Image (cartoon, rainbow, N blue to C red):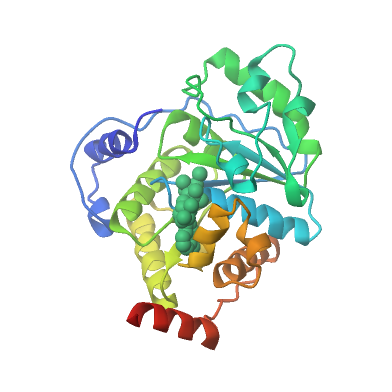
């Protein structure tokens, strides 16, 4: 997969519109993002398929995916997580597990779907993305159809399939997000994350037959910041891509998230009443039921933050 800077460069170089200036730095010319041929939907027999993606890496996709899975499970849903950030083993690390089989093992003739579906802690079932693999580049057409064939059964074994993709607009990421029913685009308020988020929005809008992408703004300090970021991206998408992109919600910057990652536990388990956990639960409800309730920081958190900042 091409690196982040290269993907973005390619995208902005080719751009005829000046949209990136709205969300960050612009460049002006280049090649198309990795052009998928005919996006073929992932198998889905009734399961709702949600891809979690981002332009820039490290913005919180894997944590959001794993914790959303927990929130959905708590709501009685049957969930399967697919770690499609191949070679990075994010989901394994966040759950404190390691796995013998991963998604790429499906390319071996004698490995079947049941072998790669792992029963993780907290009732999470997942397919690992593996770690340290050189092979995790782009799939050949033959590998694609083999994967498609073997993954067909997933559609029948879950109400919701959550796919944690890699960052950027490489072919494997684009294929996953184009094949999903809906896409959660995670960004932080940082200008570099916003510019890269725009690159993903643009690539997605170019190829998606029925665009269905919503934003999650992670690591915000207050509600005003999240509204500002969401508004900026929404307006840019409307103006230059003619795509409607709503905001599902925001997640506060919360040191409990960092602590939970260190403990290799999802924050919903480790610190269920933390601010970030509340935000993720609210996002899960927004996804499931369409409710949208902004999470207030509350007095205790106000004091905690206030004292942190003035220390
Ligand atoms: N809301 C948050 N508050 C504080 N730190 C966060 C938050 N979300 C993510 N992080 C930090 O960002 C890191 C990267 O998150 P991760 O989910 O692995 O990103 P990605 O999957 O997009 O690469 C986490 O390990 C954590 O330290
Ligand atoms: Mg990740």
Left-right relation of 69 to 173: right
| Residue 146 spot, x, y in % from top left | 66, 17
Picture quarter with the C terminus:
bottom left
Q: Which quadrant of the structure image shows residue 261?
A: bottom right
Left-right relation of 282 to 38: right
Q: Which quadrant of the structure image shows residue 282?
A: bottom right
Left-right relation of 195 to 294: left
Q: Which quadrant of the structure image shows residue 35?
A: top left
Q: Is residue 216 visible?
A: no
What residue is shown at x 33% (from left), y 58% (from top)?
A: 236
State the residue in front, 222 or 236: 222
Q: Is residue 224 above or below residue 199?
A: below
Residue that sits furthest to the left in the current view:
28
Picture quarter with the N terminus:
top left
What residue is shown at x 55% (from left), y 15% (from top)?
A: 141
| Residue 44 spot, x, y in % from top left | 72, 37
Q: Is residue 232 above or below residue 212?
A: below
State the residue in front, 208 or 256: 256
Residue that sits furthest to the bottom in the current view:
299
State the residue in front, 43 or 250: 250
Q: Is residue 65 above or below residue 15?
A: below
Query: How many numbered marks are there?
Result: 0
| Residue 286 spot, x, y in % from top left | 63, 65
Q: Is residue 265 above or below residue 273?
A: above
What residue is shown at x 24% (from left), y 47% (from top)?
A: 17
| Residue 304 spot, x, y in % from top left | 47, 81
Q: Is residue 311 visible?
A: yes
């Amino acid at each position: 997969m091409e690196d982040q800077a290269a993907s973005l460069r390619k995208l902005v170089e080719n751009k005829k519109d000046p949209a990136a200036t709205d969300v960050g730095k612009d460049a002006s010319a280049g090649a198309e993002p990795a052009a998928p041929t005919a996006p073929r939907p992932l198998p889905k027999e009734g399961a709702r398929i949600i891809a979690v993606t981002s332009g820039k890496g490290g913005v919180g996709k894997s944590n959001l995916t794993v914790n959303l899975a927990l929130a959905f499970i708590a709501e009685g849903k049957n969930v399967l997580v697919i770690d499609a950030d191949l070679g990075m083993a994010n989901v394994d690390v966040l759950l404190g597990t390691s796995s013998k089989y991963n998604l790429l093992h499906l390319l071996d003739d004698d490995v079947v779907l049941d072998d790669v579906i792992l029963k993780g802690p907290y009732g999470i079932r997942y397919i690992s993305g593996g770690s340290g693999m050189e092979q995790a580049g782009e799939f050949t057409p033959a590998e694609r159809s083999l994967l498609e064939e073997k993954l067909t059964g997933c559609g029948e074994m879950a109400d919701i399939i959550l796919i944690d993709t890699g960052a950027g607009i490489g072919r494997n990421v684009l294929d996953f997000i184009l094949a999903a029913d809906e896409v959660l685009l995670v960004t932080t308020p940082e200008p570099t994350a916003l510019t890269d988020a725009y690159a993903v929005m643009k690539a997605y809008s170019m190829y998606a037959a029925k665009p269905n992408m919503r934003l999650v703004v992670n690591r915000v300090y207050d509600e005003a910041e999240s509204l500002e970021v969401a508004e900026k991206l929404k307006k840019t998408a409307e103006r230059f891509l003619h795509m409607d992109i709503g905001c599902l919600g925001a997640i506060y910057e919360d040191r409990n998230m960092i602590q939970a990652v260190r403990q290799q536990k999802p924050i919903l388990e480790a610190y269920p009443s933390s601010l970030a956990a509340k935000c993720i639960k609210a996002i899960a409800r927004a996804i499931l039921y369409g409710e949208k309730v902004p999470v207030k920081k509350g007095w205790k958190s106000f004091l905690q933050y206030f004292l942190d900042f003035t220390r």
